[in-house]
Amino acid sequence: MGNLLVIGAGGVSSAAVTKMAMNPDIFTKITLASRRKFKCDEIAENVKKRTGIVIDTAEVDAMDRIAVIDLIRESGAELLVNLALPYQDLALMDACLEAGVHYLDTANYEPEDEAKFEYHWQWAYQEKFEEAGLTAILGSGFDPGVTSVFATWLKKHKLDTIRQIDVLDCNGGDNGLPFATNFNPEINIREVTAEARHWENGDWVTTPAMSKKVEFDFEGVGKKNMYLMYHEELESLKTHFPEIERARFWMTFGDAYINHVTVLQNIGMTSIEPVMYNGAEIVPLQFLKAVLPDPSGLAALTKGKTNIGDIVTGTKDGVEKTYYIHNICDHEACYREVGSQAVSYTTGVPAMIGAAMVLKGIWRDPGVWNMEQLDPDAFMDMLNTQGLPWHVHELKGPVDF
Ligand code: NDP
């Protein structure tokens, strides 16, 4: 049915590409390209071993627009899936426009020298994609991604309006290491060290990073401390559901993780300001990434489950209702199926499903879209059949934290 080019060959890409190969009726040709070709070849080998499918691999710098355009043309792809880093989003969107192909990513654009988590750079491409008759899908991971589709599904099927939304992201996995991040360490640490921000009564409320903690009993995982954080989908959710009074994002962290991040932050190792060392300019956070474990190598070690979802309060026929909708995913089951841990899996599978929506022609309106703007039904069906089943139940009332 469709031919696509995937850029980036890290943890998320490995899970996404393996799942694409498991759906050969949708993904008839897959080309995987990244900065270092050997990473693509490792994924290609895993894909061949598990599915018998052969994928093409190539080396490309995502920032080299001309090289990306040439590769798109050479591969004959109609969709580019960006599973590299947020820094490359705009360069890849430009390449898609010039080559005339659709675009999909899992994280919003970030300038390397500022941790902003804002959508305006990508939203500014709305007219260009519309005029070109091309579709750009932003944030087709789990959060952002599935959690935004969950909200749209609730609004379509269970609620007339959404008053409050809390996104709860719990990783109950344990890899046995003293400190490791579950996805790209640089992006992960930029997120957790940023000030917390949530949307309340028409304004952003800012609080110091990791200063608000709540214990929550997660099904399949147990009681965990979750921390209020800023996360990019809050901006798009409050924009696309203008009736929302409060939107918050919570993520669980163990005490050891918090202690390590606190020390690293106190000694300046999480800074993105360049420093001179031995005559060369280095960014402390990028150096830290280089010495931390590679998340894609943690898959075999990680045990336990993730539980990610939304608690949403709104009204239906004038009556207030609260729903909890979530997915539980098992690290070891993901490893058995595709060779990845659950954080890569829960991001890679929605990227695969988003790509399927584009290739099948279900999400094809020209323009730039966040996930909550698109019809949720076919995507929600595929979550159930592609390894991320979801559960929804009504709660007695709104959250009290
Ligand atoms: P990794 O660091 O494991 O992988 C990134 C890949 O991109 C690497 O293969 C890297 O190459 C490649 N890359 C980096 N720069 C370039 C470049 N200039 N040109 C070509 N390739 C490049 O990251 P993850 O797999 O953990 O994360 C991938 C993306 O998914 C990130 O944007 C992350 O923010 C996002 N994400 C989204 C989530 C969601 O739920 N929405 C959750 C988790 C992650 P090399 O191997 O040479 O370093």
Image (spheres, grey):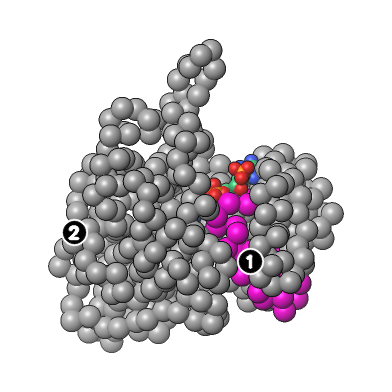
Q: Is residue 186 left or right of residue 76?
A: left
Q: Which residue is more in the foreground, 125 or 229?
A: 229
**Cβ of mark 2 under 8 A from ligand 1:** no
**Residue at left offset 42%, top offset 70%:** 330
Q: Work out whether 271 lies above or below 292.
A: above
**Residue at left offset 66%, top offset 70%:** 50
> Which residue type does callout 1 highlight?
Thr
**Residue 4 is inside the magenta segment:** yes
Q: Secondary structure at mark 1?
A: helix
The quarter of the rendered structure image containing the N terminus is bottom right
> Which residue type does callout 2 highlight?
Val
Q: Which residue is more in the foreground, 376 or 295?
A: 295
**Residue 235 is inside the magenta segment:** no
**Badge nearest the viewer, 1 or 2:** 1
**Cβ of mark 1 under 8 A from ligand 1:** no
Q: Which region of the structure is painted magenta?
A: 1-28
Q: Is residue 59 left or right of residue 285?
A: right
Farthest residue in the bottom direction? Answer: 317
**Residue at left offset 34%, top offset 27%:** 268
> Mark 1 or mark 2, which has the lower sequence index?
1
**Residue at left offset 23%, top offset 62%:** 224
Q: Which residue is mark 2?
A: 214
Determine the image quadrant of residue 151.
bottom left
Residue 146 visible? The answer is no
The residue carrying pointer 1 sits among few (fewer than 14), some (14 to 19) or many (20 or more) residues within 10 Å by Cα, namely: many
Determine the image quadrant of residue 361.
bottom right
> Residue 179: x and y, percent?
36, 45
Farthest residue in the left direction? Answer: 400
> Residue 292: x and y, percent?
45, 40
Q: CA distance from mark 1 to mark 2?
A: 36 Å
Q: Which residue is mark 1?
A: 18
